[in-house]
Image: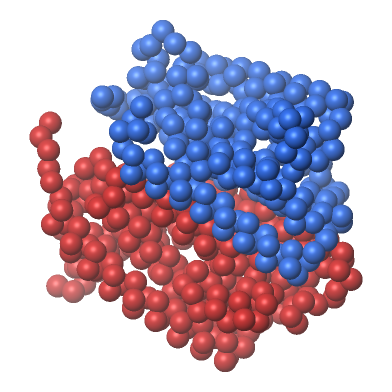
Amino acid sequence: MSAFEYRAAFLTQAIGMMLNDICWVACWWIYHQKFPVVNGWQFEDTMILFGLNCFAFGLFVTFLGGSFDISRMIYRGELDYYLTFPKNVLWHVALSNVLFSGVGDIVYGIGAFFVFADPSLEGVIIFMLAAIFAAIGMFSFMVIVHSISFFVGNFQEAAESIFWTLITFGIYPPSAFKGGLKLIICTVVPAWFVLIMPVELVRNFEWQNLAIVALFNIGMLAFAITLFNYGLKRYESGNLVQAKI
Amino acid sequence: MFSKKVRKYWEVFWINLRTEHVYLINMLARVTFIGFRIWILAQLYEASFKSQYLSEVEGFTVSTVVWMVALTQSFGILTSPDMAKLISEEVKRGDVTYSLLRPGSYILLQYFTFWGRSLMPLFWSICTGALAAWLLVGTAPISFESFCAGALLLFLGGTLHAIIQLILGLLAFWLEEVSAFRWIYQKLYIALGGMILPPAIFPDWMRTVVERLPFAQLFYSASEITVRFSSEKFLQFISIQLFWLCCTSLVLVCMFRSSVKRISLNGG
């Protein structure tokens, strides 16, 4: 509701994010002018990859934007406020902030889908499913990396860096990755299951791949919740006085 | 008198430098993941060159391109934490008044805080980036001359970035939300600043324009000169950086003087 109260802020953020995404399109257009095909991957494929990941990211930050602040809340003792409520702490924190910029990403993602992918009813359903699972995966990974703060103290900037590394894998043509890097994106930074396989679903749907994506991302969510709750037991309050108005 | 004035800014720099050491795991994790991003880009360019059966693009080999991108990514650690975001939040919360009350120039305090916070991560980031590039594509023709020239360009580029961040942060005095401008600036220095695609391999007409914009002068110019030194190019880059430093400094000073007049204090 506050988004509609501060309309100028809402519109500048949404439009700003769309312009932001258009800059990426320009960057990839320049790249594909020099390298039209990279291991079978063309500009249109890159746009589907980027569009889907934008849409998924937009869903994630719009509804669960508070998860970006988990690390800061842990090391500054700001979780105290949430501990006083009879609500699940993780969901309360995650839902406590709405990043209006996500609306710009969602609009861009929908636009990219209709321009570069199959806009049939079946295509729309597959796109939505792929994006939802990708958003779940992004949220889960965010919670996992930020929960490290429970064990090591200030991990804010490192957690952001690790999260953006995951996102980075989702904006480059995956046909270029091989060897040890491919192993890493299937394990430590699971971009293969969170970002790349959902795109493959849109490009070439298979039920088996849908099952893998669903199981992995839901499984990662379960792990993220478990890790957060385990870390919460180690949480120590600070003397921070804060007012939430 | 002059040394006392300088000393307080030095102390701010030193305190922030030492603070970075407290959270060592945080800093080391940040720089480690720069290595991953360089690895991604190295594989991307190797595949790209191979797919077009090219050994060189615009006179640059894969090795040179990867080194340039690796160093640009390493220098890019200066963008974190987002100074514009910190300042705009300070302005929105009202904490900026505490900073303004301090016996020193707000702009200089922020500038020395920026370098204090950034110097150690920058050092480790450069070490990580150089090691990653060396392991992936081998050595680069970096001489003592190119290293010194690159260091100077990096210092001026970092200063330019700090000034732009201050300008964006101070926009919070006028606008409710400055995130949109931060993101657009971020994407401009990523897209046009050599973080992914070096301007050196852009089409000629585009390269001419992009190299004269401030985004390529933040981190990319230092990386190109370090890896492929040319005195003509060095002088060109220095001139462009000095031009943008003058313009942005003027804008910053005018904005700051106007900003402090807009401060309104509420009780509570």
Locate residue A52, reporting x and y percent.
67, 40
Quadrant that contains the N terminus of chain A: top left
Residue found 74% across the figure and 80% down from its top? B58
- Res B25 quadrant in image: top right
According to the image, what is the colour scheme of the structure?
by chain
Residue found 74% across the figure and 64% down from its top? A32
Q: Viewer-proximal residue, B184 or A155?
A: B184
Give the answer, above or below, for where B205 lies relative to A49.
below
Farthest-out residue, bottom = B232
Give the answer, above or below, for where A40 lies relative to B137.
above
- Res A167 quadrant in image: top right
Q: Does the rendering let one see residue A113?
A: yes
Q: Which chain is blue?
A: A
- Res B51 quadrant in image: bottom right
Locate residue A115, reporting x and y percent.
69, 48
Farthest-out residue, left = B267
Locate residue A206, reporting x and y percent.
86, 30
Quadrant that contains the C terminus of chain A: top left
Q: Is residue B217 left or right of residue A37?
A: left
Q: Viewer-proximal residue, A44 or B23?
A: A44
